[in-house]
Image: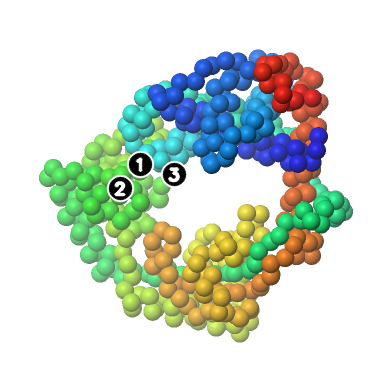
Amino acid sequence: MKKHHKKKHLKSIRFLATLFILISTFSVRAQDKVMVDEIISKVDNYIVLKSDLERAYLNYLASGNTANSQAKCSMLAQLISGKLMVAKAEIDSILVSDAEVENNLDRRMQLILSQYGGSEAQLAEYYGKSIDDIKADIRDDIQEQLVVQRMQDEIIKDVKVTPAEVRKFYNGIPRDSLPYFSTEVEIGQIVKVPKVNEDKKNELKLKLSELRNRALEGESFEALAKEYSQGPSAKYGGSLGFAQRGAMAPQYEANALRLKPMEISKPFETSFGIHITQLIERRGNEYNSRHIILIPDPTEEDIERTKASLDSLRTLIVNDSIEFQKAAKEYSEDKITAGSGGFFTDDLGGFRVSVEDLDPVIFFTIDSMEIGKITKPMSFRQDNGKESVRILYYKSKIKPHQANLKDDWQKIQAATLNEKKSRILNNWFNKARNDVFISIDEQYDYCGIMN
């Protein structure tokens, strides 16, 4: 098998979990398009239906790709590989528990519901099925997904690459085929969120108490949420859908679960803002609720006080009294970057990020900065809408260049590891297929999957 085919095989296995869900009921609205169920492949006691392949292919086309018979062959190979892993897992007694399946199913349903405003009624109406029927439709797929993932983990769990293998992989790439990387930078930040004064919080609590009274007097909670709530759920009438216990902010969950169905809480505070919530339903360890949230903005005085505090920390860093990364881990209130010592990271966890992926505000800020400098404290809004203050550290800049071992070791190492995993998975497939019965409909002979 050629190298680029091996890479495709690894990619297909790695993302099989996603594929299983894509080819489920949610790929195509059942009442809009009914697909013919025809068995096109058997792997021991497991089957691949023509509808499975067609749903996957429709998603491929819906993503903007052009019709491609080879792509369809690749998808069929992915499906067969998945069934082979499940069949081998059964032989090798590699299992997943019902609890794992249910937990994954619950998370999957929350993700699906989020696309429908958290409304089970809207989701059920759209697919013309009850929530229980929808869950039943995807439960087996999720179980297979988990088995495939566990089987894959078993196959490649000990795979590593040595520096010699990385160099060999790199040297084996034709020079005119080496990727070209755009400008990359190392940028760190330390973020502080101004503490809002109590007068402002009390003002919002009073407003929420008034909204609560209006709802108690008969006005629609959903309509009030759409008009006044400042959270992303506002357009859905404040609906947050079903959530597992432990998924929400502790203060939110505590207030919601004190309520009886359709009761409305008094105003309370979380790290996200000030809320009132209405419990809709409790079901085991899940609960369905909606809320109205008002986010208190700090005053200019609050912001200036935070800037002064952050500027003092900046002075310590500039004077080498504390390292930037240590300061970020201890004091930054941005959880995502604080864990990496304040630095933004790429998909591999590396500190060098492409300027094309930078927030425009950061890009234009560093455009006029000298490397090695730290900005004065600046106000900005986080993705969650919170007014915040930060300092930026412009550590380094790598100019556009063709991939090389000196500048791009981490990326080349990751590519080497992926190629090795692909090779091992491919070898496993070639051996494992002799342990099970596999048949493929002759209409797909042109794919050469079993060659």
Depth check, mark 2 against mark 3: the one in front is 2
Which label sits on residue 117?
Answer: 1
Sooner in the amino-acid sequence: mark 2 or mark 3: 2
Q: Quadrant of the C terminus?
A: top right
Q: Is residue 420 above or below residue 89?
A: below
Indicate the amino acid at tag 2. Lys
Q: Which residue extends farthest front?
A: 67
Contact (Cβ within 8 Å) of mark 1 with mark 3: no
Residue beneath disc 3: 246
Indicate the amino acid at tag 3. Gly
Depth check, mark 1 against mark 3: the one in front is 1
Residue at 30% across, 56% down: 230
Q: Residues within 10 Å of mark 2 (few under 14, many from 20)?
A: some
Contact (Cβ within 8 Å) of mark 1 with mark 2: yes
Residue beneath disc 2: 235
> Could you tell me residue 375's position as x and y percent?
53, 79
Q: Nearer the viewer, residue 392 or 127?
A: 127
Q: Is residue 301 above or below residue 160?
A: below
Sooner in the amino-acid sequence: mark 1 or mark 2: 1
Look at the numbered disc 1 and give the secondary structure of its residue.
loop
Look at the numbered disc 2 and give the secondary structure of its residue.
helix
